[in-house]
Amino acid sequence: MPLVSMKKVDIISALCVIPICVYVFYESGRWPILPDLGNPAWIPRGVAAVLLGAALLLLGKALTGRSLTLPGRLEGADRARVLSVAALTGVYVVIIERLGFMTATAPYLFGFSLALGERRWSRLILFAVVVPVTTYVVFDRLLNVPLPRGLFR
Amino acid sequence: MVDLGLLLHGFGTVLSGYNIIALVLGSFFGIIIGAIPGLTATMGIAILVPFTFGMTPITGIVMLLGIYTGAIYGGGIASILIKTPGTPAAAATVFDGYPMAQQGLAGRAIGIATISSGVGGTFTALCLAFFAPILATFALRFSAPEYFALACFGLAVTITLSGRSPVKGVISGLLGLLLAMVGLDPMGGFQRFTFGFAELTGGLSFVPMLIGLFALSEGFRQVEIILTAPKVSAVLKNILPSLQDLKKCLPAFLRACPIGLIVGITPAIGADTAAFLSYAETKRASKEPESFGKGNPAGVAAAQCGENASTGGDVLPMITLGIPGDAATAVLMGALTIHNLQPGPMLFQGHPEVVHQIFAGMIAANVVFVILGLIFARFFAQVINIDRKFLVPLIFVTCMVGSYAINNVLYDLATCAIFGFLGYLMIRYDFPVAPMVLAQILGGMMESNYRRAVVMFQGDVSMFLTRPIALTILALAAFTTIVAVRRQRAALKQEAAQLAALEQSSGQ
């Protein structure tokens, strides 16, 4: 796999970090200074200052072509797979409390395995049914860890 | 010094009732996790921490110790059978393990790897039991300035030694420090960085974040690459090594044990470095170095023994000073905290019986995985063939359930998912994840001790330079940072040359 420069990633990362540092300075300026307890802003500001320096260093290195390399870009089918799994997981987090653990997990697992390229339907269905039921029994019944019941509440 | 009475009592506790069942189950799952390429010991502990919530502290901890030691050993199985290390730490086992398998000696190689891991692990666990009380007694002299210096040292080492780029390590670690500040001010009690969310008042949920950054992120990585590991077809026979084999491996054990221990104690470098150093040293000292890389059992023994010998060294600074040696011990530390046990010298004062139970658990875990490894070698070999299209979704659901199980709130689930994806992006683009988590642990220690020190010495910050222990630790932190920056410069030069050559070749 050919090596690819991380210039773009480094620039984006640095540009994401800089506003965080600025915000730390802004918010820590509003904190109360308590007598005899030292200035609470010292450590956060110190951390933010070093972080800002590191972000600027990363940015400078990227702009002067001194970024490190990574083996290959994430593109095509690989990127589609990662993004679809991320989207599925996001939806799962949103619906799990409303639908309940088993009702939400079954389609999640089905879609997940499908996204990974599994096409044997019998296995997909069996997996999507057995895993949620087993997990529910182990956690909710045996380990007494309540899982969301949603529709079955 | 180690209290033998308490240690024996610790063995009694660990080897009785549910504890021994938890230890065996932990070791079993640990070996499985280690044997599957792409799954690491850290990930295994992070995923299975929630399973210990309902257990008593010692039952939960011995289970996690079983997972930890078992996973470190299990990585060698895949190295031998399919030339793909089960865990990064087992990379050195490939050199001689795979050639042995190609010669039809896979069973013998796994047997030697198992015994060697057990020897290294037991040695280091005994050293832990011996040295930890001494170090903890010394650490009782520490006051706020020393703890602040220690936290700085831990941060400096983990940040600068992690990953290829210290700058990215610094960014990751400092972001972790800022995340540790979310919640209430440790002395003033006012809200910081909560953006008005009530859920953030108590700080970010540490365990869901840990599961996200260490386990879910690796899950995303597996989605990206969908590892197509070669199927295991080797027939395992003669697994139990002969006395002659062990005699040949003895010099490797004698070198790998101390190397592993010392490397383990050094923060931020762990089992992988220990394995490579042990292998290289054994090869260098051998009368027939040319046989290494062609299936020399001593090569397998050195790598596996060194790898497991680092585990006790990793645990030592965590349990005595509250400073995790690597990512896996950071997760272990998180688990101890969940069970209301705060690692550090006060743990030795307040709960000496628990500390000795942990020592006993660590020693027993190394014996248990040897027994399991020898009995179930053929089963663990088949585990490598498990279909990723089902394994990866299972990991995701386990992470989600584990995160939800802590407080039964959706917020924890969302934290795990968000940090899982963030962790994946960080791994993908070379930002090390471990500094972010370690900084979360050390951040609180650093800030509260700094503030306490300032109050104790009435604002005079020169106390960091006038107290010899604090000054020595801070000097060590500065020295480590300088060395790491110099190392990074050399690496950058090398990569720039590679990139230039690549651009030149693509231009032609």
Image (cartoon, rainbow, N blue to C red):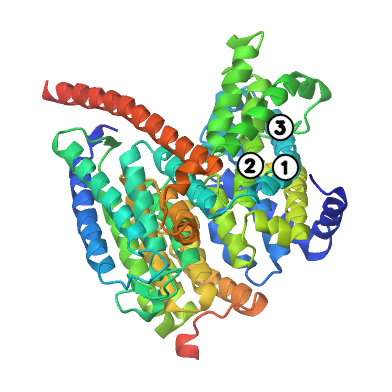
* Residue in the image at 64% along x and 63% along y: B341
Q: Secondary structure at mark 3?
A: helix
Task: Please check whether the numbered discs 2 and 1 fall on a single chain.
Answer: yes
Please, is residue B268 above or below residue B324 in the view? above
In this view, the mark in front (1 or 3): 1
* Residue in the image at 53% along x and 68% along y: B402
Please, is residue B423 above or below residue A33 in the view? above
* Residue in the image at 86% along x and 48% along y: B4
Of B414 and A151, which appears nearest the observer?
B414
Determine whether label 2 and label 1 are within 8 Å by CB.
Answer: yes
Of B474 and B212, which appears nearest the observer?
B474
Q: Secondary structure at mark 2?
A: helix
Q: Residues within 10 Å of mark 3 (few under 14, many from 20)?
A: many
Which residue carries the number 2 mark?
B311
Say left or right for A88 vs A137. left
Please, is residue B56 above or below residue B349 in the view? below
Quadrant where the image shows the N terminus of chain B: top right
Tag 1 subunit? B
Residue B495: percent from left, percent from top: 28, 27
Which residue carries the number 1 mark?
B125
> How much space separates mark 2 and mark 1, taking CA atoms?
8 Å
* Residue in the image at 35% along x and 38% along y: B166
Q: Is residue A110 visible?
A: no
Task: Please state which amino acid type lies under the numbered disc 3.
Answer: Ser
Which residue carries the number 3 mark?
B116
Of B420 and A58, which appears nearest the observer?
A58
> How much space separates mark 1 and mark 3, taking CA atoms?
14 Å
Say left or right for B394 vs B13. left
Q: Which mark is residue B137?
A: none
